[in-house]
Every structure is written in structure tokens, then in C-alpha cells.
Amino acid sequence: QKEVEQNSGPLSVPEGAIASLNCTYSDRGSQSFFWYRQYSGKSPELIMSIYSNGDKEDGRFTAQLNKASQYVSLLIRDSQPSDSATYLCAVIEGFGNEKLTFGTGTRLTIIP
Amino acid sequence: GAVVSQHPSWVICKSGTSVKIECRSLDFQATTMFWYRQFPKQSLMLMATSNEGSKATYEQGVEKDKFLINHASLTLSTLTVTSAHPEDSSFYICSARFAGGPGEQYFGPGTRLTVT
């Protein structure tokens, strides 16, 4: 069974520190990888997408992809209380697929 | 850019009635739209995938006669919950895939349905 796995947390990080979120996936044919942020009671918001091995930076966010090890991570630098949310890892598995396979999410709390 | 709207944002209806939820991509064309449902403190559950001009593809266990999906244009998809019951009360969220893009989905703000 194809899976996307995340540590459910909760993960608590002091304000100003780096938050590190990890995700592993089982389908080696996966091509597209996404991080979504979901605040309680709200819908998911796309914050990062990554398609090739290595790092991709956008502001305080860095996504890292390692296809050989089948993991994707999200680093949040200078964490702010407003970063407190559930972070969902999502993967498009295989070729010609359109559906996202979501992990169960990691709940992140930034402690002021 | 990449804004998806949903209407209504919340709705209360009586058991046995039908409710229609609209999902629009405001500034891009979406070849594919998706409908999800999320119960409190649970993960997103994909209900169906809809492509413009064709029948929706429903996930296993989702009743296609109860959840009617119409994707009339590249910017509009609708979900109709027919003969709603209290167990249909949930947070319904649509997403749209950017036509020609690598696969990212942009989510609407969601519709909270309460069936009394």
C-alpha cells in the first residue's frame, strides 16, 4: 500500500528557532512533492512545492528532497507563533496521476 | 494568483434537503478539480476528482448518487449533497489543479455543512 508518513507530533519549537518537519513516502515513482499548512478550522494552503533532488528555498521556508532515500523535509527558520499549524506533506505518486496522497500531518506549536 | 473560492462558506440545512456548493478558480483555468471532506481532527479525505466536461471519478465508498458533481467549465465545479442527513455534516473543501502545471493543487476556503 502506497503511503506518505509524517510524525504526528505535536512538535514544539521555541520562537526564533528552526522547525524541522519530515516526511517519507513509499512509492519510488513519485515525482511531485508539496507542503501544505493548515490552521485549525481552515483549509490547506500550499506553501512549498519541490520536484527535483536538493533544496528549494522560499523566504523562511526550505524544502529538501532526497528521492534515493524517499524523504522530503520542510525547514522553517526564525519560527514565529503564526507558524503554529498542522503541516501536511503531499505526494503525487507515479506517472500520469493527478491525486495527492497526504500524510496525516504534523502539528507544530511555536512557543513564544 | 491561484485563488480558489467556494460558496457558501457555511450552510445549515434540514435533514432530507439538498445543498449545492460551488467551487471556482478565480484567476486560472483548472483542468481538474477535486472535492474533499474533513471531519474534526481527522485527515482530508478525497471524495472525487472531476474534469471539465466529463463525469467525475469517485473514490471507493463515496456514493455518486448522493454526492453529485458537475464540472461545467474550466473555472467552475459544483458539489450537490442530495437528501442530506446529519452524518453528512462536515467540512467540504474543493481544490483546483492549474492547467498545464506540474500538479500542485490550490484549495478553496471550504464549506462547513451542518445538517439538522
Image (cartoon, grey):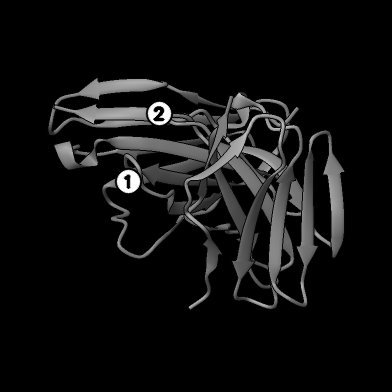
The quarter of the displayed image where residue B88 is located = top left
Distance from disc 1 to disc 2, alpha carbons, whole Å, reads: 14 Å
Indicate whether B62 appears above or below A94: above
Front one among B111 and A104: A104
Query: Do marks 1 and 2 share a subunit?
Result: yes
Residue beneath the point at 80% across and 59% down? A51
Indicate whether A18 appears above or below B4: below
Front one among A87 and B52: A87
Can you see residue B72? no
* Label 2 crowd bin: few (<14), some (14–19), many (20+), radius 10 Å: many
Residue beneath the point at 66% across and 27% down? A80
Where is residue B15 shown, x and y percent of the image? 12, 31
Front one among B106 and A60: A60
The residue wearing badge 1 is B67
Front one among B37 and A80: A80
Where is residue A60 shown, x and y percent of the image? 79, 35
* Label 1 crowd bin: few (<14), some (14–19), many (20+), radius 10 Å: many
Residue beneath the point at 44% across and 46% down? B36
- Residue type marked 2: Thr
Where is residue A100 shown, x and y percent of the image? 58, 57
Where is residue A24 shown, x and y percent of the image? 62, 67
Q: Which mark is residue B111?
A: 2
Q: For this view, does B23 lie left or right of residue A16? A: left
**Which chain letter matches label 1?**
B
